[in-house]
Image: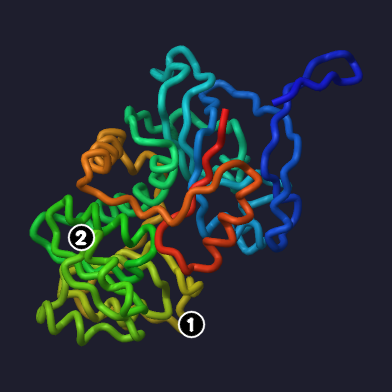
């Protein structure tokens, strides 16, 4: 962080951040001097210690996001760190460990690919842990998406069966660990037979090899159909996923790893009779602080294995982290850790 002097003699604090000025390839991720973000009332400023790197940030860099994203933009839909500034009545104090994610962060306003980020106070999740920042940095978005999908989307209960379509994604792996914690029996898919044991390592009871049609495999294990299904692959396989669910069971559409978000010539009669279809795309408030704390404690105790693809140090490594995401060859999420 530096303190350049403006023409009128005023001092303006700046910081180095990753900025996408215009859509492009990895070279569009440029490190630039930008003003230190000024905190507005009702917002907090966080000193960023680490952030996960996500598919949606690759989409933003490529210019494939919706109209909410404008440029130039500092990407980063999640981050962890400590409170730098907050309103006195916010219940947050300087130095407190916090996580934040979603809510337009890194899309509608600047995100966490920077030493400091400002976000609305209600978008902050406090926690206490001795886990290293590279571990904590991988967790907020994928835990929030997974937990929100299982609870708000599916209302998953102990004793129920859950199918995760797209199980080796970061959200899929997180959903498996959370679902087991909730007491569910988990079926989960991978397109690569060699990754079946990886699914078992994250608590999956029945790994399935996905060749595009898995209805018969699921029904062989659960003849009446599973109680719930989490769709992460997308609309290309959604009709097949719907056929794996029992009558009055529920499918939650959360992601589209295959890139297809719509079904041409869709008709409601494509949904099997009595099967419910919903969706999830929630916010930080869908991950209660006590739930996040419980997951951190479980990781610290060795009960949950966080899916981390690799750890990168410094903003200079953001391009490498996004390249890892695009390659899709390493399971889990890349994390970037920032120094002081």
Which residue corresponds to the image point at 39% horizontal and 64% vertical from the top-left? 169
- Work out which quarter of the rendered image holds the N terminus and state it: top right
Counting from the top left corner in percent of width and height, residue 9 is at 87, 13
Of labels 1 and 2, earlier in sequence is 2
Circle 1 residues within 10 Å: few <14, some 14–19, many ≥20? few
Specify the quadrant of the image occupied by residue 279: bottom left
Report the residue marked by disc 1. Answer: 264
- Work out which quarter of the rendered image holds the C terminus and state it: top right
Q: Nearer the viewer, residue 297 or 263?
A: 297
Q: Is residue 215 placed above or below 302 in the rendered structure?
A: below
Q: Is residue 167 placed above or below 320 in the rendered structure?
A: below
Using residue 61 as the reference point, say whether residue 290 is left or right of it: left
Report the residue marked by disc 2. Answer: 203
How far apart in space, not on screen, are marks 1 and 2 (Cα)?
A: 36 Å
Q: Is residue 248 placed above or below 53 in the rendered structure?
A: below
Counting from the top left corner in percent of width and height, residue 26 is at 68, 59
Using residue 211 as the reference point, say whether residue 9 is left or right of it: right
């Amino acid at each position: 962080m530096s303190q350049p002097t403006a023409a009128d003699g005023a001092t303006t604090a700046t910081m180095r951040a990753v900025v996408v000025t215009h859509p492009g390839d990895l070279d569009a991720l440029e490190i630039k001097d930008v003003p230190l973000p000024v905190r507005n009332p009702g917002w907090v400023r966080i000193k960023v210690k680490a952030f996960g790197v996500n598919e949606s940030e690759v989409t933003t860099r490529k210019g494939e996001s919706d109209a909410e994203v404008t440029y130039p933009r500092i990407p980063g839909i999640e981050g962890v760190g400590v409170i730098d500034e907050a309103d006195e009545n916010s219940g947050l104090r300087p130095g407190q460990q916090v996580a934040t994610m979603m809510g337009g962060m890194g899309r509608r306003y600047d995100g966490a690919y920077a030493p400091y980020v400002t976000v609305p106070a209600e978008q902050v999740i406090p926690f206490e842990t001795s886990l290293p920042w590279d571990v904590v940095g991988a967790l907020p978005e994928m835990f929030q998406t997974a937990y929100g999908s299982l609870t708000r989307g599916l209302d998953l209960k102990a004793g129920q069966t859950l199918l995760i379509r797209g199980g080796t994604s970061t959200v899929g792996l997180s959903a498996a660990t959370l679902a087991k914690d909730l007491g569910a029996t988990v079926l989960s898919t991978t397109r690569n037979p060699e990754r079946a044991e990886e699914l078992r390592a994250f608590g999956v009871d029945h790994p399935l090899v996905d060749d595009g049609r898995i209805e018969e495999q699921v029904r062989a294990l659960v003849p009446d159909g599973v109680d719930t299904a989490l769709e992460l692959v997308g609309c290309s396989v959604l009709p097949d996923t719907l056929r794996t669910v029992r009558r009055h069971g529920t499918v939650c559409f959360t992601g589209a790893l295959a890139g297809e978000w719509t079904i041409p010539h869709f008709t409601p009669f494509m949904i099997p009779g009595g099967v419910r279809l919903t969706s999830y795309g929630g916010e930080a408030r869908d991950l209660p602080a006590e739930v996040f704390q419980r997951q951190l404690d479980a990781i610290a105790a060795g009960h949950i294995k966080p899916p981390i693809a690799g750890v990168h140090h410094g903003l200079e490594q953001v391009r490498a982290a996004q390249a890892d995401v695009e390659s899709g060859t390493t399971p889990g999420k890349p994390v970037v850790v920032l120094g002081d």
